[in-house]
Amino acid sequence: MTELGTADLSFDDTQPVRIDDTAAVPTSSIPVIDIENVHKIYQTGTLEVAALRGISLTISSGDYVALMGPSGSGKSTLMHILGCLDVPTRGSYLLAGEDVSTMTEVDLADVRNRRIGFVFQQFNLLPSLSAWRNVELPLIYGGIDRSERKERAMAALGRVGMGDRVEHRPGELSGGQQQRVAVARAVVSNPALVLADEPTGNLDSVSAGEVLNLLAELHDSGRTVVLITHDADVAGAASSSFRIRDGQILAPAAAVAGGLA
Amino acid sequence: MKLLETFRTGLEAVISHRLRSTLTVLGIMIGITAVILTVGLGEGAQQQVGSAISSLGANLLIVSPGSTTSSTGIRGGAGSASTLTLANSNVLANKTVAPDIAGVAPVVSASESLTAGSTNWTTTLVGSNASWMSVRGRSMAEGRFISGHDVQTNAAVVVLGPTTASQLFGGADPVGQTVDVAGTPMSVIGVLTAEGSSSTTNDDDQAIIPITTAATRIIGGTSRNNLSSIYIEATSSQTLSAAYQEADNALLSLHGITTATNADFTITSQQSLLATATSVDKTLTVLLAGIAGISLLVGGIGVMNIMLVSVTERIREIGLRKALGATPRVIRRQFLVEASVLGLVGGMLGAVLGLAVAIILPHFISNPIAISAAAIAGSIVVAIGIGVAFGVYPASRAARLAPIDALRSE
């Protein structure tokens, strides 16, 4: 853990250290995330529930942004849309300048595989696979060779301090350890964008601190990190934050200082 | 993602979920074993009935003396004297006269008392020739049957039915012993294999002697050449009606009868028996198809349930794999590999178990079990087909969901 640094998080030795270059997203003009007036409406029978009501948001490459709000505010829905796990009912989403709504299912799978890394509150590790086999999964879908996959999975686990537990299954690991494996999985395919949905929600404060440190290190290495939380202290780890309530963005970063109402 | 990787992922999923895979394989295996056994039992019964009927002599014709015409007037020959003679029988045995007749057995029979030492037993005494054994479809338990030479030489030899032999000799070996037949000592040359009794006659309780011996030593007199009946064996069940025609024409011309309705003999074929056999066969075939169909249906529904449950509980996994970059096609292929491997392993084990039980079980129950290649192949194809269909279809549906909907599913 102590050895973690910018250079260590450059996962591909053939690439320059700066991730921004590999992601081909010029910092200058095009933002990584640009959503405009996004709505998400869930239909339950005849009842319509609006989870997002016209959210517009721009996140530049290399930012570390926290989306903060109480449960039911729509922040998770927003992250799912940002991560291409779900589609908005209305509104546009440009991911690094590309309109996501025009992408095919295969394009979206490729985006999720190479350009976005997820960290979930529930870890979402496959219980039947060992730690390194879980970390390896995105590389399998990325068409990486078997030997290189293992090498990269082991390296990623080493960087999150799980190098001595690569053969453990999720059930044999603590929550904090599982989340560190999940972080390793999120970054193993070297994505430019890391999305973390309440990554510390199920962790004790020590483990939570460790996971936040890892995210900060990912940010330091040049990645764009979007963190979702209901906890003002956790949001404080980000360099800027937005507050979401009732499916709308309330106030920009400055308001965070006052804490949650 | 390469095909090999998909295959590996699917295979690993099968291996890593040991309990679920074992239960799925078990379900498929039992379904297939059940189909093989039910079909095998059905076919075994069908074959048993078929062979029982053919052992009665499906290609047998019986010529009886007397007339069955409905014309009025006095019918010569019916009653006191038989119209069938040994000469008639010899003509029928002539291949140029009746090419579709495989064997002819003239028969005289009478109830006679047999004595061996101090034991006596009354049985049916049959005089016939060497063809009798093949025409009646019998075989020897020991010793030999009457030969052509015995018939030519009026030999004093006798072949006993198994019941007759045990009544006269108890447990002792009768072959070589002497039996007193209606006062004539005869040497026992063989014992017939037990046949079982029919409703009208006991085929195990009789004594067979050469027909010439019966004519000269037992019957004698003017009726010595008269026959009780002539048994005719057609070359096959297909040529039965041809054999019938040949025998009918030959006997009519021998007896100088021009109008068939005035015939002084009757030929009965086993037509009624054949009709029964055919209808039993049809019934069994329908029954068998029904059993096989229901077994396949039940087995298929079992496989379907297992696959549906197994896939439904993995929709979260499908969502996660999609979130990590799997395309719907890759998901579909993974589940196709899994379902095929489970189906194939279950199918093979089911076939092996079914065959093993089909071989072992008949030793403990009286019913034979036929091993049907069609049932084995059919049940495996259906089990794998249903397994793949219901393993891939829900997975394919889940793969089309938005990843988060799959991830959030319970």
Image (tube, rainbow, N blue to C red):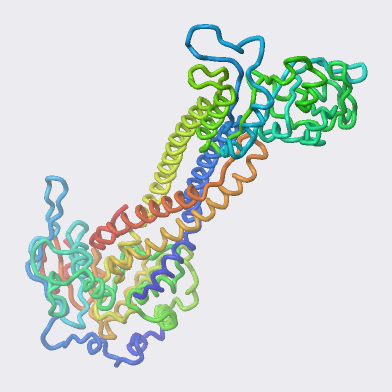
- Residue at 36%, 77% (x, y): give it: A139
Residue B288 percent coordinates (x, y): 47, 37
**Residue A1 at least partly seen:** no
In the image, farthest residue toward the right: B117
Q: Nearer the viewer, residue B346 or A25?
A: B346
Left or right placement of residue A42 versus residue B82 in this view: left
- Residue at 73%, 34% (x, y): give it: B130
Q: Nearer the viewer, residue B113 or B209?
A: B209
Residue B219 percent coordinates (x, y): 78, 17
Relative to residue B268, is residue B152 depicted above or below? Answer: below
Left or right placement of residue A147 versus residue A12 in this view: right
User: Residue A88 is drawn in which quadrant?
Assistant: bottom left
Residue B333 percent coordinates (x, y): 35, 65
Relative to residue A18, is residue B47 depicted above or below? Answer: above
**Residue B94 at least partly seen:** yes
Residue B409 percent coordinates (x, y): 29, 54
